[in-house]
Amino acid sequence: MLKLSRLTKSFDPTLLFRDLSLELVPGEYVAVMGDSGSGKSTFLNIVAGLDSADAGEVSLDGESINAADDDTATLWRRRALGFVFQSFHVLPHLTIAQNVALPLKLNGCDATNIRSRVSEMLEAVELADRHSSYPRELSGGETQRVAIARALVHGPRLILADEPTGNLDPATAETILSLLASEIRRNNAMGILVTHSDTAAASADRVLRLTRAGLQPHAI
């Protein structure tokens, strides 16, 4: 279970949110919407342990994430987290296949399994023919799909996606949203999708809106 308990975050003097709480059970997938500047990306970074809240706690399966030391937090992210960053963060000096393989290599997977899983994920994001390409040779939408494949390739327990369909055409976006949902359910993982898109949000099990008072149920 992912449990967020009374998280508060501000950038003086602006309060982003106060007493934010949320629980996710394995297999559950939620979408978080909110106005620009409401702190959605900051919220995801706090859940991932990449930023700290002013108060409150984040725990996964009963283990505190924000109380962990840097080495423990890094190891946890490597094994349990898949993060689709809004700005992609693909490595320009690696091929597409090498970028996607990176989480598997860091987790000590053998070469045969790496090749098989990378091929599977590139096929799933419709980039099977670009495995030897470099990021500079891709469009923004293709680069976004590389980032999504890399986030999912190691079967993480927790998937965080920050506007993962922002650069995709409607048909490709539908494919990616279906992939996110299916990977979450197949691996009995948990997922949080941050989006401005009603269509993207509708792919989740429930939709929440981020406000200064925390997360509130939201109808679309």
Image: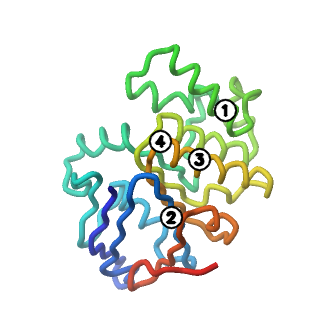
Mark 3 or 2 closer to N-term?
2
Mark 4 or 2 closer to N-term?
2
Mark 1 or 4 closer to N-term?
1
The residue mark sitting in front, 1 or 2, is 2
Mark 1 or 2 closer to N-term?
2
Mark 1 or 3 closer to N-term?
1
Q: What kind of element bears circle 2? A: strand
Tell me whether circle 4 and circle 2 mark residues in contact (CB < 8 Å).
no
State the image quarter where residue 197 is shown: bottom right
Residue identifier under label 2 = 30
Q: Which label was assigned to residue 187? A: 4
The amino acid on which the numbered mark 4 sits, given as a three-letter code, is Asn
The residue mark sitting in front, 1 or 4, is 4
Residue identifier under label 3 = 182
Distance from Cα at disc 3 to Cα at disc 4: 8 Å
Q: What kind of element bears circle 4? A: loop
Distance from Cα at disc 1 to Cα at disc 2: 25 Å
Residue visible at 72% across and 54% down in the picture: 173
Distance from Cα at disc 4 to Cα at disc 2: 16 Å
The amino acid on which the numbered mark 3 sits, given as a three-letter code, is Ser
Q: What kind of element bears circle 3? A: helix
The amino acid on which the numbered mark 1 sits, given as a three-letter code, is Leu
Distance from Cα at disc 1 to Cα at disc 3: 15 Å
Residue identifier under label 1 = 122
